[in-house]
Image (cartoon, rainbow, N blue to C red):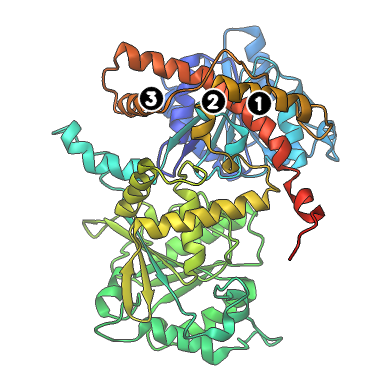
Amino acid sequence: MLWNAKMRFGKTLSTLQVVKDMDFTRTLILTHRPVVDGGWFEDFGKIFYDRSEYKYGSKTKGDTFATLEKQCKKSESKYVYFASMQDLRGSELVGGNFDKNNELYATQWDFIIVDEAHEGTKTELGESVMTALVKPDTKVLHLSGTPFNLFDDFKEEAIYTWDYVMEQRAKTEWDNVHLGDPNPYASLPRMNIFTYDLGKLMKQFIDEEVALNFREFFRINKEGKFIHDGDVRSFLNLITKTDETSNYPYSTEDYRNNFRHSFWMVPGVNEARALSAMLQSHPIFGQFNIVNVAGDGDNDDEKANQESLEKVKAAIGGNSHETYTITLSCGRLTTGVSVPAWTAVFMLSGSFNTSASAYMQTIFRVQTPANINGRVKEECFVFDFAPDRTLKVIAETAKISAKAGKTTVQDRDIMGEFLNFCPIIAVDGSRMSAYNVDGMLEQLKKVYIERVVRNGFEDNYLYNNDSLMKLDVFELNDFDNLKGIIGSTKAMPKSSDIDINKQGFTDEQYDKLEEAEKKGRKKEELTEEQKKLLKEKEEKRKNRDSAVLILRGISIRMPLLIYGAEVND
């Protein structure tokens, strides 16, 4: 299974509860971030406080693996062992350079938990590690808040999602459902995204993708100074310009107090150093303590990450309502850290091609709950100066089911709800406008077209899932015949059989099915007919998946067909 659950869901505690409920004997936690060992160890104590037969181990916490395994064989004891993906990749057994970890690969694991599964598991070595660890009876649970690169590896029914919109909806509906009970979501602030189109002001920095080229804008010379020094200074003056009609983040005293502590993403280490110096000499930003954590650019160094976090917390101090800080980074502190005092993130790096995963991990740093001087942080802000990039990432993150050639009412509802809980405001000069559903859906089409092309037409988003759930007996016969032709080529992966006897839903049945699913999500009582429809869906889904495999055999040849075609201009 894949748990697609955002930051603050409680993935660690919930997963350990699964270990406890399922009574697994041998559990392995695998992660690309060894620094989280302490967090897992702490949460282990919260879940297994009443189960003395369970033990925890890792290279730094609890017992050694040898001790755990020895106790497990001698008695009824069970254990949870924490290991890093980097360490396991180094083993000769999976193509590494060292003779180590053989005992871990030889163990019959009952349960493997892959933490932050979007990191380090899709490489050849990462896949080799998983293949060697997973035995025929091993259950595997992938955890990630941004699993955009993993969705295609799982069937629909194997993905559990808890996203930002679900969280904010639960927050607003809590009192209606649990009147009188304290709201566990109350402390989670609402996100607001402001996009600024600086293209008209800085035309010379617009790249071929019609987006602000941050690397060029912040480019430095051999002396470590900005080549476009005047432009960078003008930009800082612009976002601090006092103007009643201006909506720039530091344009008024109120705004500056609201954004006392912010996180700025910049293109690189040298750029961060130069910007730090300029900010310190600026009449407004000179009042802020500039904390540069870009370091030497080694963003995977967990020790450096921890030191950077301590540096930021020290600068903010115990009374965050009295201090001002700006943290500059080019990669550090973008995942797995919490700085409650941050109220804004400034995206001054990346490009139109920035991955949704990296972008969302970064901006959600600012949603950390906080109580500042007796006031709960209710709103947090993202300021992005590459509007096209923002919309592309948000559209991809909204995870609307892609329906070829049509937009359903459900799609509009999902996007409308997202914009309700996370308003996206476009600022052009000093004119503000909120993005509407139609604008975002238009952006979504571009996202899926680009994705299909990028994946060489081997992408499930190419196919209309609605239609493939409604195949009649003649269409099923066509697919069966098509499989006979396509299946004979070597490039085609082996597809499942089409079951001619299992025709798809009619339009009327499909509408009833959607109604049943909606009812099921709200935990309402289902009728016998609705229960039957939901059961039938599972059977018809197999036909749909088989049809997609057959169609993929054609679609992956599309680039060759296009390049090879004789086209009359």
Amino acid type, label 3: Leu
Q: Which residue is mark 1?
A: 479
**Looking at the image, which is closer to me, 217 or 547?**
547
Residue 429 figure quarter: bottom left
- At horizontal 84% and vertical 37% (from top left) the residue drawn is 95
Badge nearest the viewer, 3 or 2: 2
- Residue carrying label 2: 471
Q: Position of residue 174 (x, y in %)?
A: 22, 37
In the image shown, does 169 or 46 lie closer to the viewer?
169
Q: Which disc is residue 513 wearing?
A: 3
Look at the picture and state if 350 lies above or below 44: below
Residue type pointed to by label 1: Phe
Identify the residue at horizontal 60%, vertical 86% (top origin).
226
Q: Amino acid at mark 2?
A: Leu
Whether residue 312 is visible: yes
Q: Earlier in the sequence, mark 3 or mark 2?
A: 2
566 is higher (above) or lower (below) than 151: below
Left or right, 321 with reference to 130? left
Measuring from the top left, give residue 109's x and y in whole percent: 66, 19
Q: Earlier in the sequence, mark 2 or mark 1?
A: 2
Circle 3 SS class = helix
Quadrant containing the N terminus in the rendered view: top right
Q: Secondary structure at mark 2?
A: loop
Image quarter in which the C terminus is found: bottom right
472 and 272: which is toward the camera:
472
Q: Nearer the viewer, residue 402 or 321?
A: 402
